[in-house]
């Protein structure tokens, strides 16, 4: 084969490969356009359900914008005055996949309920102990001091990150209550 034929063959292969890549990219973009609204709606429904699960006396939630720590990804006030809800992202064992937590507070800033929405980045059987009722029950009735809330032996990274995120949310609520 001559050099010219080799060059044409290589060019044809390159054009075919680029064409395949272009078709795949267009298909992926189309699929994303079709599924993105459905995924966003499902995420919003899950967050609304999480809000209700930790503050079931709420009538309607209003999102409060403001200066929050990185761990507090969303902060809501019940328009009926029953309390607040914070959605948290706690970077535990797998900091690239943080735990997602909902915490409900009464109007005075005391913790009413804590729900783990997701802890898929935590080590199964160890870090996932933060989802256990014994650990979560420690937070009920606490204020921002979190006196008496212990970490879990063997799951110190996960439980410490969890506790610090709840402490951050409690500080945000205390500031809101004081204003």
Image (cartoon, grey):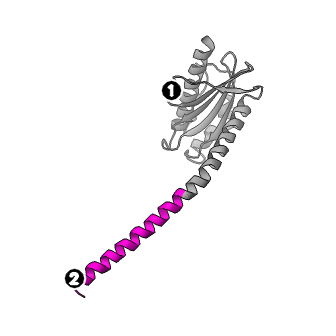
Q: Is residue 108 above or below residue 96?
A: above
The quarter holding residue 89 reads top right
- In whole angstroms, how far apart are the C-alphas of marks 2 and 1? 63 Å
Q: Is residue 138 magenta?
A: no
Tell me the residue that label 2 is attached to: 3
Residue topped by disc 1? 69
Overall secondary structure of the magenta section: helix
Look at the numbered disc 1 and give the secondary structure of its residue. loop
Comparing 49 with 162, the one in front is 49
Secondary structure state at the residue bearing disc 2: helix
Residue at 66% across, 37% down: 47
Is residue 133 shown to the viewer in this render? Answer: no
Q: Is residue 53 above or below residue 147?
A: below
Comes first in the chain, label 2 or label 1: 2
- Residue lying farthest top? 178
Q: Is residue 72 visible?
A: yes
Which label lies toward us, 2 or 1?
Answer: 2
Q: What span is in magenta?
A: 1-29
Q: Where residue 173 sits in the image (x, y, percent)?
A: 61, 20
Place of residue 108 in the rendered image (x, y in percent of width and height, measured from the top left): 68, 15
Q: Residue at x 62, y 35 (%)?
A: 101
């Amino acid at each position: 084969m001559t050099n010219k034929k080799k060059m044409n063959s290589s060019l044809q292969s390159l054009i075919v490969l680029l064409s395949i890549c272009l078709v795949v990219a267009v298909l992926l973009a189309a699929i994303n356009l079709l599924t993105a609204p459905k995924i966003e709606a499902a995420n919003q429904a899950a967050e609304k359900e999480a809000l209700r699960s930790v503050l079931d006396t709420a009538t309607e939630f209003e999102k409060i914008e403001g200066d929050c720590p990185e761990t507090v990804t969303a902060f809501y006030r019940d328009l009926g005055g029953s309390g607040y809800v914070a959605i948290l992202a706690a970077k535990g064992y797998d900091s690239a996949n943080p735990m997602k937590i909902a915490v409900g507070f009464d109007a005075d800033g005391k913790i009413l309920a804590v729900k783990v929405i997701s802890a898929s980045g935590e080590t199964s059987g160890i870090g996932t102990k933060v989802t256990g009722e014994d650990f979560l029950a420690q937070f009920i009735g606490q204020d921002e001091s979190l006196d008496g809330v212990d970490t879990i032996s063997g799951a110190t990274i996960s439980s410490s990150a969890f506790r610090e995120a709840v402490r951050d949310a409690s500080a945000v609520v205390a500031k809101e209550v004081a204003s």
